[in-house]
Image (cartoon, rainbow, N blue to C red):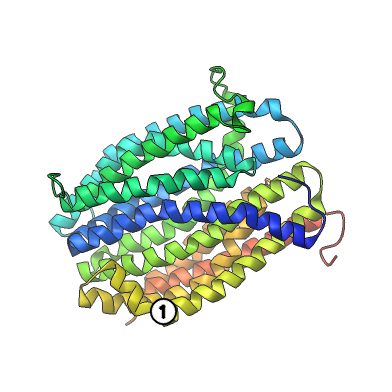
Amino acid sequence: MNETSTLWQKTKHFFHLFIPVFITQISLFAMSFFDTTMSGHASSADLAGVAIGSSLWIPISTGLTGILLSVTPIVSQLNGAQKHKEVAPFVMQALYLSVAVAAVVILTVLFAVPFVLDNMRLEPKVHDIAHRFLMMLCFGFVPMFAYNVMRCFIDALGKTRVTMLITLLSLPVNISLNYLLIFGKFGMPRLGGVGAGIASAVTYWFIFLVAVYIVHTRQPFSSYRIFERLYAVSLPVWKDLLRLGVPIGFAIFFETSIFSAVTLLMSRFDTVTIAAHQTALNFASMLYMTPLSLSTAMTIAVGFEVGAGRYRDAKHYSWLGIGIALAFAAVYSVVIFVFDEAVVSIYTTDPAVQTLARQFLVFAILFQASDAIATPVQGALRGYKDVNAALIMTLIAYWLLGLPVGHVLATYTDWAAKGYWIGLISGLAFGALFLLLRLIHVQRMQQRKPLSS
């Protein structure tokens, strides 16, 4: 990253960071998207099974990946402070930690998932697909978490185009494997939704190995000599990573797990309702990649400016990112409203699923403004290394306010499954308000000039 002085320079530089991150996130999401859509074209049971499996996996993966996101603000601030020699040992410790995290997740999936699925009222075929989908994903956990460390290191240096290219390379690998394994093409077994799990695991290994090669051989990454030596495990460094990363991870977990919890609670409804819910939620999640990408760009930009002691510039980047997010939210709301029929037809050809999914999409419009505020604000707060308050705020907003509202409406009113969507909207709105107030407080505490400047 470079120092900027004018709003135009900041805008140009911010988009230079954001656009590659956005393409990267869309490409990563595309793996889940193609898992879902291609499974849906195999059968409604495959779609529901992958939906349930993903609902168990996504909050775990995003929450624990969030712990590793502490690499980005730390490396970004080290880079801004010109402390380049401290980067390599830190990144290696983060890689060690990622392997430990993956081991814990594998054990959790192996022993806890069967118990969870057994206690859900799922149709036998959906239960079987969800279980085997998750078992296949286990083979990709180690490279997935390790790749996220490599990605955070690369992005923290402002080279977001590199991770974009890595992810774009992986997309045809994932789609091709899905085609072969879900539908049983070219002599491969027809595995349905289970094949999607195998395809994702293989793709995780691919992107990790490509990232290692680039970091080891290409400038400016090779100048940091990340793999020059093997460092002994340093528990103090792990402690520093976890001190910053655990609040980040749990804040992300509380946000993503609320959606998964709703999907799991919907298991009491029929397969059509589960499939329709997953269709609408999957599309809304794709749109969420925009504020999520803006959040990453804000962490890099704000962290760099804070590390250099330029707090006024950090503030400008924060509000610039929120403004851009709101503009995207307005466009996406129009897209959902106008093209709802076309959207659901991408996921399924089942008329009953299509009809219900279009109704759920109406509620997804109301997600947009809240996501456009809450997610980028969290990115800015990470740049300031202010993460503990966000943890508490997301817990209260999503789990103590949003989910109870949804449960009451779904259980005791005629809204039924739609009541859960109203609860999600409520939780997101509370979260956006709480986090925005926190950012204003942090900026007033740290900036050299008043907020109104």
Q: Residue at image x 43%, y 76%?
A: 336
Q: Is residue 156 left or right of residue 338?
A: right
**Coordinates of residue 161 in the picture (x, y in percent):** 56, 47
Seen from the viewer's position, the closer of residues 438 and 165 is 165
**Is residue 362 visible in the rendered structure shown here?**
yes
**Coordinates of residue 190 in the picture (x, y in percent):** 14, 49
Q: Residue at image x 57%, y 24%?
A: 235
Q: Residue at image x 23%, y 62%?
A: 40
Seen from the viewer's position, the closer of residues 65 and 171 is 171
Residue 348 vs 246, above or below: the answer is below
State the count of labels. Answer: 1
Q: What element carries label 1?
A: helix
- Mark 1, Cα crowd under 10 Å, few <14 / some 14-19 / many 20+, is some
Looking at the figure, which quarter contains the C terminus?
A: bottom right
Residue 117 vs 368, above or below: the answer is above
Question: Label 1: which residue?
Answer: 362
Looking at the figure, which quarter contains the N terminus?
A: top right
Q: Is residue 445 left or right of residue 119?
A: right
**Coordinates of residue 413 in the picture (x, y in percent):** 34, 80
Seen from the viewer's position, the closer of residues 126 and 295 is 295
Q: Residue at image x 43%, y 81%?
A: 337
Seen from the viewer's position, the closer of residues 450 and 75 is 75
Type of amino acid at the residue the image marks with label 1: Val
**Coordinates of residue 14 in the picture (x, y in percent):** 67, 56
**Is residue 392 visible in the rendered structure shown here?**
no
Residue 139 falls in image quadrant: top left
